[in-house]
Amino acid sequence: MPNLTFSDRRQLESLFNMGGGYVLDFSDGSFSSFFRQDAGVDIDDIKYLFNGKSKANRLRAFWEIEPPGVVAVAIDGLLKVWRAQNPV
């Protein structure tokens, strides 16, 4: 069972500015730190590299293989980062 629908993914990809392999304004190091600290995940693990090495491709792989609860924790954290970068 997929964690996210196609339309969910499209909306999140747009919100997180995932074009060109990026995710928000994360560097490789800060992306790894975010996942380690906020989601308890090693996003640099080889299991997330099947789509490619970019941050966006690792995030897409994460969405595909992790259980919905783990994905939800990471999305919640990413949304908090997005909100901090885009105050109303």
Image: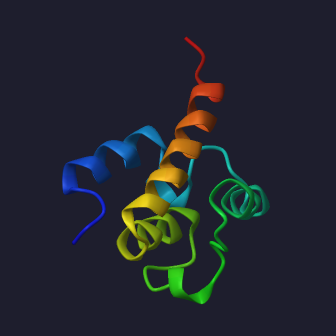
The answer to which image quadrant residue 85 occupies is top right
Q: 45 and 13: which one is in front? A: 45
Q: Residue at x 49, y 48 (%)?
A: 75
Q: 86 and 68: which one is in front? A: 68
* Vertical side of 61 occupied by 27: above or below: above
Give the image location of residue 80, x and y in percent: 59, 34
Q: Quadrant of the N terminus?
A: bottom left
Q: Residue at x 39, y 77 (%)?
A: 65
Q: Residue at x 36, y 72 (%)?
A: 64
Image-based side of 21 in relation to 34, left or right? left
Image-based side of 46 in relation to 37, left or right? left
The answer to which image quadrant residue 53 occupies is bottom right
Give the image location of residue 46, x and y in percent: 59, 88
Q: Quadrant of the C terminus?
A: top right
* Vertical side of 60 occupied by 13: above or below: above
* Vertical side of 52 occupied by 14: above or below: above
Give the image location of residue 4, x and y in percent: 28, 57
Give the image location of residue 27, x and y in percent: 73, 56
